[in-house]
Image (spheres, rainbow, N blue to C red):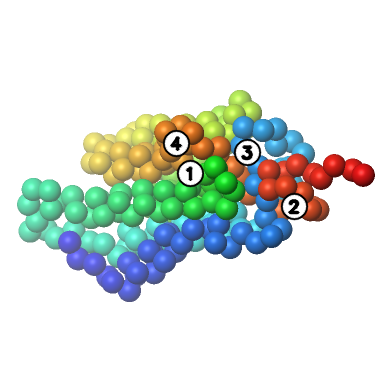
């Protein structure tokens, strides 16, 4: 495996830095299991979500561009590039998920995961699954469905467009995408989404009682 260390290092900085490090006092958290109707605008208006998607896409693109296979490699070494990409992807998603300033909670990295797929995979293979996942999660009013739906759609459509040669890369991406959902189940953590608060209240989106 050949590595462009400058691009690889830049990819690691972009992908492995938890977005929660930049959540200030005005950023609050809301469990994704709760109704979002009154918080959509506050969620969308938090610019960190856009930054999260953009840096994930750029980091994913740099990661893919920084690694090249050695034609002379044999055995497992033939998969060293794919395994490195998969390892970085899974580590990045885990860091975004577990680094959360809300106690007993995990961050739901919707934007990061979507952006990451656009950086790692061709636009058609990434775009359609993201669209399907958003539609299913929004239509069913079950935001957590975004992660398993995205994982299954990525594998199915990636196999359809890319064939058998994409199976290993799709499987690794599928694992990375499902991690937030799986971790919340395994460790009994609430998945939360960040939003920009209008006024002071607790970090779960509850306003202080009126006097």
What SS does tag 1 mark? helix
Between circles 3 and 1, the one closer to the viewer is: 3
Label 2 packing within 10 angstroms: few (<14), some (14-19), many (20+): many
Of labels 4 and 3, earlier in sequence is 3
Say if mark 4 contacts mark 1, CB within 8 Å.
Answer: no
Real-space Cα distance between discs 2 and 3?
14 Å
Between circles 4 and 1, the one closer to the viewer is: 4
Say if mark 4 contacts mark 3, CB within 8 Å.
Answer: no
16 relative position to 109: left or right: left
Real-space Cα distance between discs 3 and 1?
26 Å
The residue singled out by tag 3 in the image is: 31
Quadrant position of residue 20: bottom right
Label 3 packing within 10 angstroms: few (<14), some (14-19), many (20+): many
Say if mark 3 contacts mark 1, CB within 8 Å.
Answer: no
Q: Position of residue 144 (x, y in %)?
A: 54, 33
**On residue 197, which mark appears?**
2
Label 4 packing within 10 angstroms: few (<14), some (14-19), many (20+): few
What SS does tag 2 mark? loop
- Name the foreground residue: 115 vs 29: 29
Q: Residue furthest front?
A: 211
The residue singled out by tag 1 in the image is: 127
Of labels 2 and 1, earlier in sequence is 1
What SS does tag 4 mark? loop
Q: Residue at x 32, y 67 (%)?
A: 8
Of labels 3 and 1, earlier in sequence is 3
192 relative position to 5: left or right: right
Quadrant position of residue 210: top right
Q: Residue at x 25, y 41 (%)?
A: 168
- Name the foreground residue: 197 vs 200: 200
């Amino acid at each position: 495996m050949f590595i462009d260390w400058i691009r690889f290092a830049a990819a690691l900085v972009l992908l492995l830095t938890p977005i929660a490090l930049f959540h200030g006092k005005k950023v609050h958290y809301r469990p994704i299991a709760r109704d979002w109707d009154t918080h959509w605008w506050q969620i969308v208006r938090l610019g960190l979500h856009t930054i999260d998607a953009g840096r994930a896409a750029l980091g994913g693109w740099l990661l893919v561009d920084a690694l090249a296979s050695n034609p002379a490699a044999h055995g497992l070494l033939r998969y060293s590039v794919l395994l490195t990409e998969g390892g970085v992807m899974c580590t990045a998603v885990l860091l975004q998920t577990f680094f959360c300033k809300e106690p007993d909670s995990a961050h739901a990295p919707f934007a990061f995961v979507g952006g990451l797929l656009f950086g790692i995979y061709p636009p058609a293979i990434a775009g359609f699954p993201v669209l399907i996942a958003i539609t299913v999660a929004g239509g069913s009013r079950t935001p957590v469905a975004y992660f398993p739906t995205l994982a299954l759609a990525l594998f199915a459509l990636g196999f359809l467009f890319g064939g058998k040669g994409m199976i290993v890369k799709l499987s690794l991406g599928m694992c990375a995408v499902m991690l937030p959902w799986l971790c919340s189940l395994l460790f009994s953590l609430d998945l939360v989404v960040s939003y920009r608060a209008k006024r002071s209240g607790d970090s779960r989106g509850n306003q202080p009682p009126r006097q």
